[in-house]
């Protein structure tokens, strides 16, 4: 079997539809959704960068999360939309490996970054006097770099481990982007070690992050409920609710996508789950933060007023 690694030189991704007109319609629709998600996240990046009032650890991590979401939605959707428009399903082995690495890397960074953001909220609410010391700029950068470097190791290991296999059963991937579970189903090699390493690493990282986030919010809620002033409680909860919603959206989407292996033949369910995982979280994250955050909304209004004044003067 080891001599069959070159038997597959390219893969075929799943189409949005078998009907040509629907292919064009869906590709344009998803490109519009992608554009909305891209602009929403870019807006948060710009606002949190140019408004000095938002140069705090919380908004530093929100900005990084938006950058990660931009990368996440840009890895799969534009390519899939363009391929659907030109009626091309082919992706090279190198392109597939690159896509798998980037998807795993970005997903890992997003999960660990959300975990770091839980720590930020914990320190801000439970230890406010120590907050400037613990969450200083250097510590924030170090935590972000740790997420990035460990993400490279995680994604690199599983990508390399996957492409050591032989692929000779088929070259049809039943998703509109490449992922490890889909490729394992196409392999004619022994995949037991790959499955075990993938499951163990995902469970360890997922459970560790989930446990840390849960413990942080148990401490946060117990502290907030002891606040004597209701208004202080409301303000504390308002900074936590968007983060909880984003975490829930990310974990639920990932859970349903990888709840079961891909089917033997393409189905609308495979497409819907793939779209939900790849598009919905990056699209809704900026909406959640902008709708629930008064400071971001105020900063947007200030920037828009400045732009209008500049245009009127010009």
Image (cartoon, helix red, strand yellow):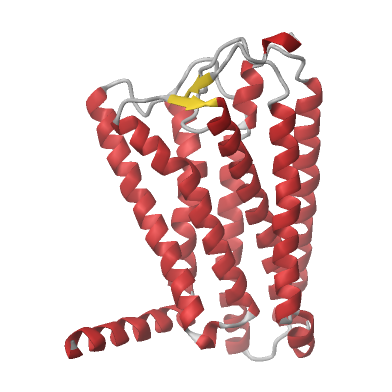
The answer to whether residue 236 is above or below residue 263 is below
Which is nearer the eye, 104 or 202?
A: 104
Quarter of the picture containing the C terminus is: bottom left
Q: Does residue 39 lie above or below 50 as drawn?
A: above
x, y percentage for residue 178?
55, 31
Q: Splitting the image into 4 quarters, where does residue 16 fall?
A: top left
- Please give the count of numbered marks on the rendered protein: 0
Would you say residue 221 is visible in this rendering?
Answer: no
Q: Is residue 180 left or right of residue 131?
A: left
> Which one is in front, 251 or 61?
61
Kindly identify the residue that appears in the image at 45 percent across and 63 percent down.
41
Q: Is residue 307 above or below residue 201?
A: below
Residue 217, horizontal then vertical, whole percent: 72, 67
Q: Residue at x 77, y 48 (%)?
A: 205
Residue 110 lies left or right of residue 14; in this view the side is right
Give the residue drawn at x 52%, y 22%. 173
Which residue occupies the foreground of this view, 37 or 227?
37
Q: What residue is at 69 percent from the left and 65 percent from the top?
A: 144
Which quarter shows the N terminus? Answer: top right
Query: In the image, residue 162 lies at what x, y percent?
Result: 70, 27
x then y, percent, for residue 288: 48, 65
């Amino acid at each position: 079997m080891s001599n069959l690694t070159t038997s597959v030189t390219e893969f075929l991704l799943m189409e949005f539809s078998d009907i040509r007109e629907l292919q064009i319609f869906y590709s344009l629709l998803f490109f519009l959704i992608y554009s909305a998600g891209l602009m929403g996240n870019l807006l948060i990046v710009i606002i949190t960068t140019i408004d000095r009032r938002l140069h705090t650890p919380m908004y530093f991590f929100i900005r990084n999360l938006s950058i990660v979401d931009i990368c996440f939605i840009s890895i799969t959707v534009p390519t899939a939309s363009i391929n659907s428009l030109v009626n091309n399903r082919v992706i090279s082995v190198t392109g597939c490996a690159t896509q798998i690495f980037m998807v795993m890397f970005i997903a890992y960074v997003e999960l660990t970054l959300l975990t770091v953001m839980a720590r930020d909220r914990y320190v801000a609410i439970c230890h406010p006097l120590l907050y400037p010391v613990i969450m200083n700029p250097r510590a924030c950068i170090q935590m972000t770099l740790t997420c990035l470097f460990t993400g490279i190791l995680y994604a690199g290991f599983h990508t390399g481990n996957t492409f050591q296999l032989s692929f000779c059963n088929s070259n049809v991937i039943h998703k509109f982007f490449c992922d490890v579970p889909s490729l394992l189903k196409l392999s004619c090699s022994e995949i037991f070690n790959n499955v075990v390493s993938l499951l163990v690493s995902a469970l360890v990282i997922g459970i560790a992050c989930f446990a840390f986030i849960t413990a942080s919010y148990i401490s946060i809620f117990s502290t907030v409920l002891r606040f004597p002033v209701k208004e202080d409680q409301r303000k504390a909860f308002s900074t936590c609710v968007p983060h909880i919603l984003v975490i829930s959206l990310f974990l639920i989407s990932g859970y349903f996508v990888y709840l079961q292996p891909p089917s033997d033949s393409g189905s609308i369910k495979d497409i819907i789950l793939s779209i939900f995982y790849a598009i919905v979280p990056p699209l809704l994250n900026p909406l959640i933060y902008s709708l629930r955050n008064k400071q971001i909304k105020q900063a947007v209004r200030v920037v828009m007023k400045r732009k209008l004044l500049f245009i009127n003067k010009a």
